[in-house]
Amino acid sequence: MFSLNKVIIVLSIILATFVSGNTVAAETGHFGLGTKATKAEIAGWDIDVRPDGQGLPKGQGSVSQGEGMYEAKCASCHGMFGEGEGRWPPLAGGEDSLTEDRPHKTVGSYWPYASTLWDYINRAMPFPAPQTLSVEEVYAISAYVLYLNDLVEDDFVLTQDNLASIKMPNEANFYMDDRPDTSNTRCMKNCKDPKKIIVVESLRGITPEQEASESSTAASKPKLSAAAIEGKATYTSSCVVCHGSGVAGAPKLDDKESWAKRLEQGMDTVVKHAIDGYMGENGMMPPKGGNLTLTDEQVKNAVQYMVEAE
Ligand code: HEC
Ligand code: HEC
C-alpha cells in the first residue's frame, strides 16, 4: 500500500533543500531581497557576438557539415536552398533588389555582418527550439547559409578566427547614425523668458482638419480664383500635414510674411519647387509633398490656393 510516511519524508527533504538553498543565497542590504548573479548566470546571458568577432566561442564548422544539419533543422521553414517555404522567411537571394519597390531582404542581400548571422542562429533558431544548437552546429549551419548566398565556396570552413573577415555585400550601406540629438543650439545668454515659450502641438494636422482650415481661410479671403478652388482639395489631402501647422519648417498657410518673401522669386520658381521638391533654409520640401500620384497641374493649383488663402 501507498505509505504516507514515505511521502512525508520525501516532502521534508525537498522543503529542507529549498529553504537552505534560499537562505545561503539571500543578500543582506536591499531589504534582503534578490541574489547576486553568479558568473555562470551572467555567462548564460552574455552571448552577443560583434562584427569584429568579439564574443565568438572557440569552434568551427564546414559548409559540408552544415548542409545535412540545415536540411534536418532549418529547411522545413526556410527551404532547401534558403528560398523560404510558404510564408516563412527566405535566407538567400534578393541580390541587387534593395532599390526596387519591393526589396527582397535576406541574409545575403541585406545583412551587414556575418556575426549577426552567427548570433541570430545561436540565439533564436531553430524557431521552435532556440539555443539547442551546439557551438559546432552553429558554425557549420552559418557556413552553409553563407554558401547558399554564394558568399563562400563549398569547401569553406567557418571558424572563430575567420568569421569577422567575411565581407557581406551590403555592409557599406549601413553607417553610424551621425545626426545630432537636437537640431537647436543651446541658448546661453539673452534667452527667451521661459514663461513665454509655448510648446506647439506640432503634429496637429496629420489627420487633416478640413473644417478648421476651411473656417479660418474663409474668413481671411473669401474670394478664390478658379485654380485655387481646384487646388484646395489637393492642399487638404497632401499638403496640410506640413503646411497647416508648420511641421518641419514648412511655411504655414497663414504666414503672410513668409509667402510674400517666397513670391519674390516669381510664381514659376515657387511652383517648380513644389513639383520637384527642394532643400530650403528651413527644411526639405519633398517633391509634390510626397504624393507622387498628383499631376503637375494639381500641385500648381494647390500652390495657387496656398498663395491666395494665406
Ligand atoms: C518552424 C519554422 C522555423 C525553423 C525550423 C527555423 N526557422 Fe529560422 N526563422 C523562422 C521565423 C518565423 C523567423 C522570423 C522570426 C522573426 O522575425 O521574429 C526566422 C528567422 C530566421 C533568420 C533571420 C531571417 C531574417 O532575414 O530576418 C535566420 C538567419 C534563420 N531564421 C535561420 C534559421 C536556421 C539556421 C534554422 C535551423 C537551425 C532555422 N532558422 C530554423 C522560422 C523557422
Ligand atoms: C513633409 C512636409 C511637407 C509636405 C507634405 C508639403 N510640404 Fe511644401 N514645404 C515643406 C517645407 C519644409 C518647405 C520649406 C522649405 C524651405 O524653404 O526651407 C516647403 C515649402 C513649400 C513651398 C514654397 C516654395 C518656395 O520656393 O519657397 C511651396 C509652394 C510648397 N511647399 C508647396 C507644397 C504643396 C503644394 C504641397 C502639397 C502637394 C506641399 N508643399 C506639401 C514641407 C512640406
Image: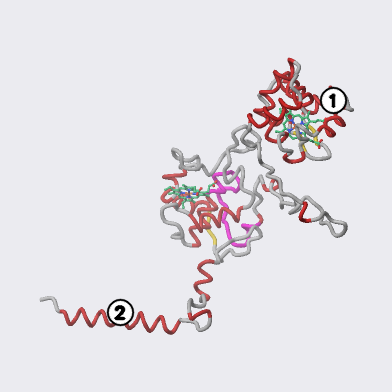
Per the image, label 1 sits on a secondary structure element best described as helix
- Point out the stretch of residues depicted in magenta: 145-164
Say which amino acid is labelled 1.
Answer: Thr
Which residue position is annotated with label 1?
269
**Residue 287 placement (x, y as % from top left):** 74, 30
Disc ID at residue 247 = none
Position of 237 compared to 67: left or right?
right
- Residue farthest along the right direction in this orientation: 264
Task: Report crowding for label 2: few under 14, some 14 to 19, many 20 or more residues within 10 A (C-alpha).
Answer: few
| Colour theme | secondary structure
Question: Image height check: is 6 above or below 135?
Answer: below
Q: Earlier in the sequence, mark 2 or mark 1?
A: 2
Please state, as top left, top right, bottom left or bottom right, where the C terminus lies in the image: top right
Which residue position is annotated with label 2?
14
Please tell me how many numbered marks the rendered image carries: 2
Label 1 CB, ligand 2: below 8 Å? yes
The residue located at (60%, 48%) in the rendering is: 152
The residue located at (78%, 24%) in the rendering is: 308
Q: Nearer the viewer, residue 107 or 136?
A: 107
**Residue 74 placement (x, y as % from top left):** 45, 49
**Residue 161 placement (x, y as % from top left):** 62, 62
The residue located at (71%, 45%) in the rendering is: 200
Q: Nearer the viewer, residue 51 or 138?
A: 51
- Residue 12 position by quadrant: bottom left
- Residue farthest along the front direction in this orientation: 219
Mark 2 to mark 1 CA distance (whole Å): 84 Å
In magenta stretch: residue 159? yes
In magenta stretch: residue 307? no
The answer to the question of whether label 2 and label 1 lie on touching residues, with beta carbons closer than 8 A, is no
